[in-house]
Image (cartoon, rainbow, N blue to C red):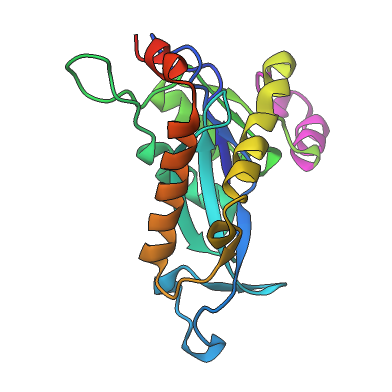
Amino acid sequence: MDVGLINGFPGHPRSLPTLWPARPSAPGAGPHPARATTGQALGRSRGGLTTKVHLAGDGRGLPLAVVVTPGNVNDSTVFDEVMDVVRVPRAGAGRPRCRPEAVIADKAYSSRVIRQSLRRRGIRAVIPERADQKANRVRRGQAGGRPPAFDRELYKAHNVVERCFNRLKQFRAIATRFDKLATRYKAGLHLAALILWLREPTQDRLSDRS
């Protein structure tokens, strides 16, 4: 799942989280299928045993949160878990910021439950309505209610998470899972994310924390 936190945090204007469908990673030298368990974030899908990486990225295509699940897990069911992992440290004292102004997400996250979750958190949802949801709403007439608010201009920034995934997949051990243990694979993801952050110009990192 890609989560795009797109309108950023107060005082942190370029940290914009974005959500997109999760990217599966095929295991390479991983466990034998007969010994695979969901405890190691492996699930059977069309491509065999796979692992899904659910990601929240900021407006520069840098990772903010990573969650690993079996490949057959539905993206939308992990939404709250990914959002709970997002933390942006403050420049001074205080708790890390975890509530962006807006979240850009793919149609895979267009559900009443997710929209209500964002509303409770005080976060603006930038999620396009699925065709079947729109057809059902129109069919019901007035009983179907109004269409959900959707900012088309802001949604154009959704590709930042795609860029974030592409940058992470430059690391071979991330693009193809070779680790038997899910904890090791996730540790590799955290290390790759750290490298991406360290590659950013120092001035950009400092200005974002001011």
- Left or right: residue 48 versus residue 184 is right
- Left or right: residue 111 versus residue 194 is right
Residue at horizontal 51 percent and vertical 16 percent from the top: 14
> Given the current orientation, which residue lies at the most extreme bottom position?
34
Residue at horizontal 39 percent and vertical 35 percent from the top: 86
Q: Is residue 45 one of those drawn in magenta?
A: no
Q: Quadrant of residue 138?
A: top right
Residue 9 is situated, as x and y percent measured from the top left of the image, at 42, 16
Magenta: main secondary structure equals: helix
Residue 195, compared with residue 173, is above or below; it is above
Residue at horizontal 68 percent and vertical 23 percent from the top: 157
> Given the current orientation, which residue lies at the most extreme left position?
93
Residue 203 is situated, as x and y percent measured from the top left of the image, at 43, 14
Residue 24 is situated, as x and y percent measured from the top left of the image, at 62, 60
Residue 71, compared with residue 21, is above or below; it is below
Residue 151 is situated, as x and y percent measured from the top left of the image, at 69, 16
Residue at horizontal 59 percent and vertical 75 percent from the top: 28
Q: Which residues are magenta?
A: 132-150
| Badge count | 0
- Foreground pick, 143 / 75: 75
- Left or right: residue 93 versus residue 18 is left
One can see residue 147 in this view: no
- Foreground pick, 158 / 75: 158
- Left or right: residue 37 versus residue 24 is left
Quadrant (top left/top right/bottom left/bottom right) for the C terminus? top left
